[in-house]
Image (cartoon, grey):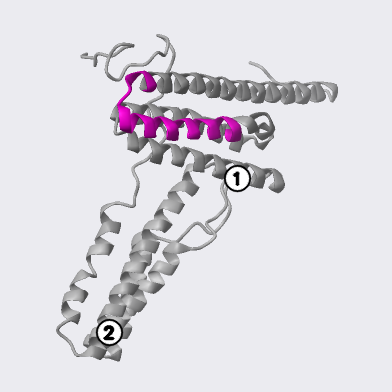
Amino acid sequence: MAQRFGGKFSPDGSTRPEGSAAKPAFHGQRRTKAGGRVNMLFVAPLPLVVVAFFQEPLVMGQYLAAFGILILAAWLTREGILAQEAYEARKIAKRPAIPRKIFASVLTGAGLGLVGIAGHGLVEAAIFAGLGAVLHFLSFGPDPLADKGAEGIDQFQSDRVARAVTEAEKHLKAMSDAVLRAEDRSVERRVERFQTTVRDMFRTIEEDPRDLTASRKYLSVYLMGARDATVKFADLYARTRDTKARDDYTRLLDDLEANFAAQTEKLLTDNRTDLEIEIDVLRDRLAREGVKPDRD
């Protein structure tokens, strides 16, 4: 089977030692649903603007108001989908504070109802409003309405983890935004791979909130330093295209990624050790009570 050439000295090369497992940049990610269907929600109301300017002032105002309401509904729909995807990506997550998609369904009905009033009558307006709200709701569904993954976990601890991960995600988002200024696709891919490793740690901590204390400096100090280094590198490289600065920055990411991966592995090892201890304790207790497994 043909294989793509790559290595330390290839254009997308890496100093990662041979034999070490490197997860792809998009490991664990899914294609966003905030795509074609949602974009059409922004396009569909545009004819109302054209129609509005051929009407008398009152009707024109109604059409333009309907256009604004429908655009707001489209924006809320997109934000609601993105919030739901972030919710689904986490094993422990709080429900979105604002049910954006539900509000968008209501606004879609209101906007179409106003179109019915402007161009037809009250009966048509009621039909448009009802159909618009129902079809929007059926197409995009409701927002998550309950917290996820908090069963059997101390609520205080899970809240601490959720806040820490949210703040850490802000640092990753700032890195993604900053590195775009460098206009170097290989560096962007390198940042994405580093972020994949970091999110592996997030998921590990979410599974066992007790790991947060041991990883606090990784989620705050180290990520804040990575964010600041990315900002400075992007500004410098955008002006000078200094290859030495790029190499220094990618080596920094290599070091950081190795440390994050090692800490994640340590957390997983500790969790396995805790599980083994629990199993041994339970077996000893069963043995003392005279219960022995029937092994065939």
Residue 184 located within the stretch drawn in magenta: no
Q: Is mark 1 on a helix, strand or loop?
A: helix
Residue under the point 78% across and 23% down = 281
Frontmost residue, 187 versus 158: 187
Residue under the point 59% across and 35% down = 220
Q: Distance between the residues labelled 2 and 1?
A: 45 Å
Q: Looking at the rendering, in which quadrant would you find the C terminus?
A: top right
Frontmost residue, 178 versus 34: 178
Residue under the point 17% across and 81% down = 53
Numbered range of the magenta stretch: 219-245
Residue 222 located within the stretch drawn in magenta: yes
The part of the image, by quadrant, that contains residue 237 is top left
The residue at which mark 2 appears reads as 61
Viewer-nearest of discs 2 and 1: 2
The answer to whether any part of residue 291 appears in the image is: no
The residue at which mark 1 appears reads as 162
